[in-house]
Amino acid sequence: MNQTVLEQKKQVVSDITEKLRSAKSVVLVEYKGLTVEKATELRNKCREVGVEYKVYKNSLMRFAFKELGYEDINVNLEGPNAIAISFNDELAAAKVTNDFAKTSNETLIIKAGIAEGKVMNADQMKQLASVPPREVLLGQLAGVLQGNIRNLAYMLDQIRKKNEEIAS
């Protein structure tokens, strides 16, 4: 093998490794059967939510995953694969790939992923994709807290009224 080609491959593995190291989450997908038009649509949807969608050779991804201790994911590196990498939001890569697979193209298959520093199977990645966005969860939490505070205020008011009755 030509020395220059070997250096180029080492550089690509280094680039993949750095991206994986700084990622919040990664989703490995098989894109067999995806038309160029659909692949472009997926790339655009990923870009809209701050996710990088990239196709790399399986052998190069294998080296990068192994270097970071994620070699468990390597059993999934058969066929045409790509990775969706989220650098800001733990849920974004899983959500965008899962939504795309469900609504736009059934040939896109989620195979595995990495989140919270752990290799996850396809089902776990799909569960991650079903978690509501942070803003929704915070809104739900605020609603629960508001209800509890309202109940506490009501109870305290009832205690005050009871004490006033007793005092009079």
Image: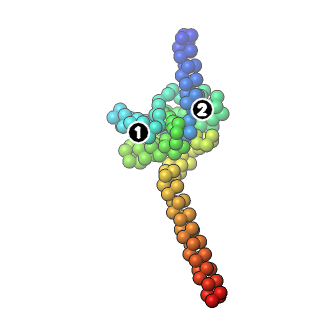
Residue 148 location, quadrant: bottom right
Label 2 close to label 1 by CB (< 8 Å): no
Q: How is the image coloured?
A: rainbow
In the picture, the disc for residue 91 is none
Residue at point 54%, 70% (across, down): 150
Query: Percent x, y for residue 25?
Result: 55, 40
Residue denoted by label 2? 21
Q: Residues within 10 Å of mark 1 (few under 14, many from 20)?
A: few
Residue at point 49%, 52% (across, down): 135
Disc 2 marks which amino acid? Answer: Arg
Disc 1 marks which amino acid? Answer: Glu
Rounded to the nearest whole Å, what is the CA distance between mark 2 and mark 1?
22 Å
Q: Is residue 157 above or below residue 64?
A: below
Secondary structure state at the residue bearing disc 1: helix
Query: Percent x, y for residue 1?
Result: 56, 12
Residue denoted by label 1? 48
Question: Does residue 154 appear anywhere in the picture?
Answer: yes
Taking depth in this image into account, of 61 and 53 the one nearest to the observer is 53
Give the mark, 2 or 1, whose residue is nearer the N terminus.
2
